[in-house]
Image (cartoon, rainbow, N blue to C red):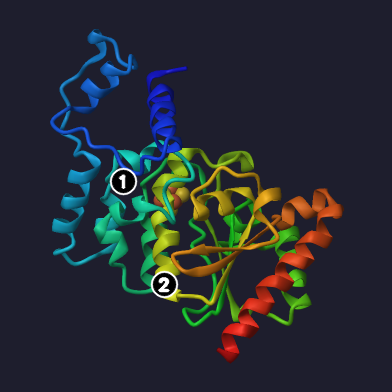
C-alpha cells in the first residue's frame, strides 16, 4: 500500500467514524502524511500550500466572485483534500459545497458539455476519444445516472447507446417514458480504459459536473443505475441490493436505486427487481404531477 492509499484509508476511516470534514489547522499535507506514517522524512518536498477543508471552502467562496468559463473549469484542480480522497464522498454530502466555484457557476447544460469536452481534471481525458456529458433537456423531470461511458458512448459522444442503452430505452418505455423526456448521464464523463471501474479520484474529480447538472435540472426523481451511481449520489458504501426498492433523497430530490442495464444483460434475474424500481420512480413522477 503506497502513501496515497494509506492517506485515503485514513480519511475513509475518519468518515466512517462520522466526521464530515477535517481541519488540519496549520499543518501541511506532508506533515499530515508524515504524522500518519504515509511519508518518510526523505520524501518530503516543498510544495504549494494546500488549504484545509475549512480553508478550501473559504477559498471557494472567494473564487465565486469570478465569472465561470469552460477554460477556468478545465484548469481548475479539485479544490479539497476530501474530494480527492474517497469515493462516495463527493456528491450528496457536505463535500458538495467545497467543489470548484467556477464549475458550480456554469450556467447551462451546454456550458457543462463544453467544459467536459475541454476538461483535464483527471487522466481519463487522455485515453478517451471524447467527453460524454449526457443527453436531454433541462426541463427533464426524471434523470437517469449511470456509471461511465463505454466504447459506443466514447465513439458517439452519446450516453447509454449500444446494447445497454437499448435496454435502458426499453426500461423507460415500459413506464411510458421516451428518452427525449428524460436526461441521461453518468457519474464519470470520459470512458475509463477497457471499461474498468472508475477510480475514486476520477469519481471525485468528475462528480461536480453531475452535481451541477442535477442542480440545473432539478428533476422530480433521479434513478441511479448501478453501484457507482447509487453510492456516489447517496454518499454510502451500502451494497446496491440493500439500496434498491426504497426511496432515498438527494438534496431533497427522491432517488431510486436499481441495477445497471449492462448488469441486466449478464443477469436476467435482476430484470424483475429493476422493473419494480422503475415503476416506483414512475409513481413518484405521477404523484409529483398531481401535487
Ligand atoms: S472524466 Fe470527468 S474529471 Fe475526468 S477528464 Fe473527463 S470530464 Fe474531466
- The furthest residue to the front: 18
Left or right, 110 with reference to 149:
left
Residue nearest the observer in this picture, 274 or 245: 245
Vertical placement of residue 43 versus 5, above or below: above
State the residue at coordinates (31%, 46%).
Answer: 78
Q: For residue 92, which numbered disc appears in the image?
A: none
The location of residue 205, given as percent across then percent down, is 39, 47
The location of residue 209, given as percent across then percent down, is 41, 59
- The furthest residue to the bottom: 290
Q: Residues within 10 Å of mark 1 (few under 14, many from 20)?
A: many
State the residue at coordinates (25%, 42%).
Answer: 53
Q: CA distance from mark 2 to mark 1?
A: 20 Å
Q: Residues within 10 Å of mark 2 (few under 14, many from 20)?
A: many
- State the count of labels: 2
Indicate which label's residue lies in the foreground, 2 or 1. 1
Secondary structure found at label 2: helix
The location of residue 267, given as percent across then percent down, is 83, 49
Asked whether residue 79 appears in the rendered view, the answer is yes
Q: Which residue carries the number 1 mark?
A: 78
Res. 291 image quadrant: bottom right
N-terminal-most mark, 2 or 1: 1
- The furthest residue to the right: 269
Vertical placement of residue 128 versus 152, above or below: above
The location of residue 222, given as percent across then percent down, is 57, 68
Residue nearest the observer in this picture, 98 or 172: 98
Q: Which residue carries the number 2 mark?
A: 109
Amino acid at each position: 500500500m503506497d502513501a496515497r492509499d494509506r492517506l485515503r484509508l485514513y480519511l475513509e476511516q475518519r468518515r466512517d467514524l462520522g466526521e464530515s470534514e477535517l481541519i488540519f489547522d496549520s499543518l501541511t499535507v506532508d506533515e499530515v502524511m508524515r504524522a500518519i506514517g504515509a511519508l518518510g522524512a526523505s520524501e518530503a518536498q516543498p510544495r504549494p500550500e494546500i488549504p484545509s477543508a475549512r480553508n478550501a471552502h473559504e477559498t471557494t467562496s472567494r473564487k465565486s466572485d469570478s465569472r465561470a468559463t469552460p477554460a477556468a473549469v478545465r484548469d481548475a484542480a479539485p479544490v479539497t483534500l476530501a474530494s480527492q480522497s474517497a469515493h462516495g464522498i463527493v456528491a450528496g454530502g457536505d463535500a458538495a459545497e467545497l467543489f470548484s466555484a467556477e464549475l458550480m457557476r456554469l450556467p447551462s447544460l451546454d456550458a457543462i458539455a463544453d467544459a467536459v469536452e475541454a476538461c483535464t481534471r483527471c487522466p481519463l481525458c487522455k485515453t478517451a476519444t471524447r467527453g460524454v456529458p449526457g443527453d436531454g433537456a433541462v426541463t427533464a423531470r426524471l434523470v437517469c445516472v449511470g456509471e461511465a461511458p463505454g466504447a459506443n458512448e466514447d465513439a458517439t459522444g452519446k450516453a447509454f447507446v449500444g446494447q445497454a442503452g437499448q435496454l435502458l430505452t426499453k426500461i423507460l418505455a415500459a413506464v411510458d417514458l421516451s428518452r427525449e423526456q428524460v436526461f441521461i448521464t453518468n457519474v464519470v464523463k470520459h470512458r475509463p480504459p477497457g471499461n474498468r471501474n472508475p477510480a475514486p479520484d476520477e469519481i471525485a474529480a468528475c462528480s461536480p459536473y453531475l452535481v451541477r447538472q442535477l442542480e440545473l435540472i432539478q428533476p422530480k426523481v433521479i434513478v441511479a443505475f448501478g453501484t457507482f451511481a447509487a453510492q456516489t449520489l447517496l454518499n454510502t458504501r451500502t451494497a446496491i441490493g440493500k439500496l434498491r426498492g426504497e426511496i432515498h433523497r438527494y438534496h431533497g430530490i427522491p432517488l431510486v436505486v436499481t441495477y445497471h442495464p449492462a448488469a441486466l444483460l449478464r443477469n436476467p434475474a435482476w430484470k424483475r427487481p429493476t422493473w419494480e424500481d422503475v415503476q416506483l420512480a414512475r409513481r413518484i413522477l405521477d404523484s409529483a404531477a398531481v401535487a
